[in-house]
Image (cartoon, rainbow, N blue to C red):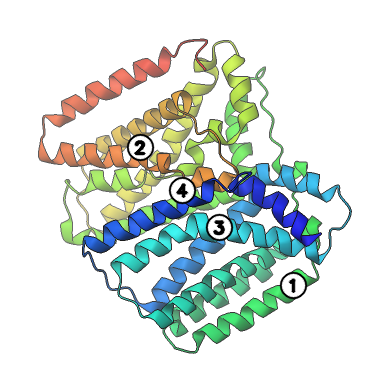
Amino acid sequence: MMKMTGKAFAKKLFGTRCERLPRTLLLDVIIFWGLYIADFQVQVAASVRILMISAFTAGVMWQAFSSRDNAVELKHMLMLPGHGREFVFSYVAALGCYTILTKTGLLLAVLLAVSAWKPIEMIGMAISMLHAVLMAAAAYSLRKYWYVGGIWTAAIVSAILFLGSRTWFGLLLLVNSFIAILILWKADGYAFYQGESEKSHVIKQRKRGSLWRYFFRYLSCHRNYLVNTAVMWCVAIVMPYFLREMAGLSVVPVGFAILSLNTPICILLSCDRDLEQAVRFLPGQKRRFCIPYCLFIFSCNMAADVLFLLSWQIQNGGVTVLMIAGAVFFALQSAVLSVLLEWFYPIRGWKIESDLWHHPRKYVVPVVMLLLAGGACVWPVMLYVLLALLAVEIAILFFIPKGHS
């Protein structure tokens, strides 16, 4: 039973013949070799390395468990007899292999290429990845008791920060992994299933402003999206402290560009195939969806930019009208580009929502914004070019062909 269930989930995640895995591993090797021969070295403490690997792996696992598309697959599997520990461990093993091989492997390749490490430390990193998979699964199965998972996570993070450099720290992770296994031993398949009521969100087109209610309902149904937005707000607050040495107007646009990296709110059509199909067949879709969607992303970006400017004023002072205008420009520019990219080039062929969060396309808009910020700082005449570009993009947004798909 365990072998059959594991194969079923593996085919969904890796493809029928695991065709995705060789491409991913080849990409990891290319990135590792490219960074290694560049001889770019960064000192990374063992505790920081373990924390990065653990947090990233656990975060991707949590996203995989929370994936609505994955929940549908799990629902079908639960219709079959046998939902005990064999089902649980095969499900966790499939998602764990997918996370480590396709997601954490890329981070591990970068860390091994740019930092100095000893062969014995590879064992510690392998233990930390296994520990993150088991702990994330155990915490997710206990999500109804969220305070237990919160205390448990805080305790492990503190232990990694203060004890992660000790040689015997791997034993502590193994003990904690054993505790997670005991929790999973008593769980069943339904502990990982989220009912339709937790993910339901419906668009009502008849009432004015209903699309905005859909946006906020969508966020309330996807709590991890709210967490990502909250993290960006925290980054906006602390970023002026790190930019203090380079205080000045030229640094502020770079901060605005970094704050545009809020992936979840920019993949609404890609992650909801039913929504995309409905929107493209509605009359006047550019007015009913694209414009409010652009304003919604602009509001989220602007909220982070306002926090950034307030924090800058408190820590460094000297916020000017030009800075405020720059915040409005970069928030609107990022929103328009995100909507156009999502409308004309939605992400296809993904397996679970974690693929969307870590798709290379997520970096297109932030990279463009960074290039625009750098160009505006070096060539002042670039400001007029940027304004003209924004005007053209807004025109395209308003005149999207009615039947475009």
Residue neighbourhood size for the residue with mark 3, other residues' Cα within 10 Å, grouped as few (<14), some (14–19), many (≥20): many
Residue 128 to residue 102: above or below: below
**Which badge, 4 or 3, is on the more N-terminal residue?**
4
Look at the numbered disc 2 and give the secondary structure of its residue: helix
Mark 2, residue position: 365
Q: Is residue 233 at least partly visible in the picture? A: no
* Extreme residue in the right direction: 81
The numbered mark at residue 99 is 3
How far is mark 4 from mark 3, CA to CA? 15 Å
Q: At 49% from the left edge and 61% from the top edge, which residue is drawn? A: 56
- Res. 235 image quadrant: bottom left
Q: How many marks?
A: 4
**Which badge, 1 or 4, is on the more N-terminal residue?**
4
Residue 181 to residue 396: above or below: below
Look at the numbered disc 3 and give the secondary structure of its residue: helix
Mark 1, residue position: 183
Q: Amino acid at mark 4?
A: Arg
